[in-house]
Amino acid sequence: MDNVHVALGARAYDVRIGPGLIARAGAEIAPLLARKRVWIVTEERVSGLHLAALKDGLAADGIAAEALILPPGETTKSWAHLQEVVEWLLAEKVERKDVVVAFGGGVIGDLVGFASAILRRGVRFVQIPTTLLAQVDSSVGGKTGINSPKGKNLIGAFHQPSLVLADIGVLGTLTPRDFLAGYGEVIKYGGLGSLEFFEWLEAHGPALAAGDMALRQEAVRRSVQMKADIVVRDETEQGDRALLNLGHTFGHALEAATGYTGRLLHGEGVAIGCALAFETSARLGLMAQEAPSRFRAHLAAMGMKRDLADIPGDLPDADGLLALMAQDKKVEAGKLRFILAREIGAAFVAEDVDLSVVRTVLAEALAAR
Ligand SMILES: NC(=O)c1ccc[n+]([C@@H]2O[C@H](COP(=O)([O-])OP(=O)(O)OC[C@H]3O[C@@H](n4cnc5c(N)ncnc54)[C@H](O)[C@@H]3O)[C@@H](O)[C@H]2O)c1
């Protein structure tokens, strides 16, 4: 079992990582409880596969659990489902000292975290992330929220969980595509902060994707440690935390262009976005020309989408994609903020990027389709 401590003073918490955590969820959560009862919010797919095991794990410690089961998918991160969760928790008479459990991928974690932030002006919640993406990224750091028809993640709050239980065993039921989408965020950590981790992934990525549990645990541990280190330095994204958005300005534009559908998953957009950010960095003379190819070669070795050519269906032209990028939250005083890099593992926040270079990178990537 690994443990990463997120040292945020009064809001500090542990991220436990390892197999079998769902079976021992009761023992892990019990110290947080004022009464032996929790409220689980989950979704249909996760519920069908793992809810009984979680309830058993809680019952083993005498903890009663009620569950609300929502539809799966990104559209659940909406005003309508936020209302449903909050009203359900109120109807269940959840009190300020109670604990809500978010049991699912990033969609459930973001939605339930936000509901917990606003219920009675804030109740505690535990994240039990069930996707690789949620284990390495969305369950840690306290960003919670829902989507607006005007864009993704535009409504939300910072609300740190009280505990995160990343059970490596549940990753075994993910589809290969969902697993690899989460791996897009894992590679992002190598790309933004550690060439050594990227090289470790080059060496072990295929075995990890094939199911090696020890390698999966190590990849989650290293990713969570990197995220925790950054979040502790900059909890509310005034500076360094923006590094975690490597690949996201491009990725979010691609997600918007594909309508947040199965054409492109979030983590797939991030992986392609990292490649485009490296390409832009190389174009600007910041990074060796070979680096973007090396990054893409690893995506190819993993059987992942790596370029705009790999996205099925139509895409807007370069100006259309730039306009979608400008919608992103990372716009400050009308300037697009990009995360660029000097090498794989050395990213930095760039405020004044020449948009004509970005347009050229996009136009060439579109022309290759
Ligand atoms: N808060 C943050 O810091 C942060 C960071 C990154 C991403 N996000 C958000 O996370 C969301 C994406 O998260 P996600 O990729 O986990 O999506 P998701 O929650 O939709 O899960 C992806 C798919 O996996 C299924 N699933 C979940 N667990 C499973 C399991 N153990 N076995 C089989 N299937 C399982 C789900 O039903 C779904 O179909 C996006 O909304 C994104 O904005 C938030």
Image: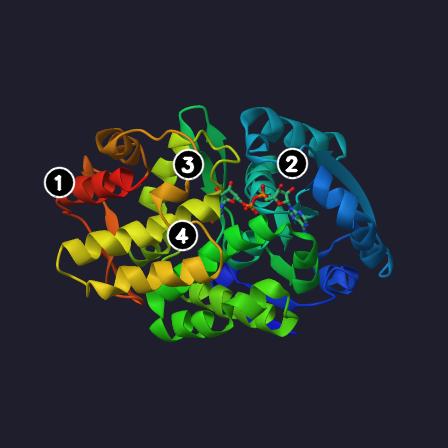
Seen from the viewer's position, the closer of residues 164 and 345 is: 345
Q: Quadrant of the N terminus?
A: bottom right
Relative to 123, 247 lies left or right:
left
Seen from the viewer's position, the closer of residues 73 and 56 is: 73
Ranked by sequence position, the earlier of labels 4 and 3 is 3
The CA span between labels 1 and 3 is 22 Å
Q: The residue under label 3 is which amino acid type?
A: Glu
For mark 1, what is the residue?
A: 356
For mark 2, what is the residue?
A: 72
Q: The residue under label 4 is which amino acid type?
A: Ala
For mark 4, what is the residue?
A: 271
Q: The residue under label 2 is which amino acid type?
A: Pro
Does the closest atom of ligand 1 sit within 8 Å of the Cβ of label 4?
Answer: no
Ranked by sequence position, the earlier of labels 1 and 3 is 3
Ranked by sequence position, the earlier of labels 3 and 2 is 2
Q: Residue at x 43, y 49 (%)?
A: 305
Q: The residue under label 1 is which amino acid type?
A: Ser
Callout in the foreground (1, 2): 1
Location of residue 261 in the rendering, given as x and y in whole percent from the top left corner: 51, 32
Ranked by sequence position, the earlier of labels 1 and 2 is 2
Location of residue 329 in the rendering, given as x and y in whole percent from the top left corner: 33, 38
Q: Residue at x 68, y 28 (%)?
A: 87
Location of residue 368 in the rendering, given as x and y in whole percent from the top left corner: 28, 42
Mark 2, Cα crowd under 10 Å, few <14 / some 14-19 / many 20+, is some
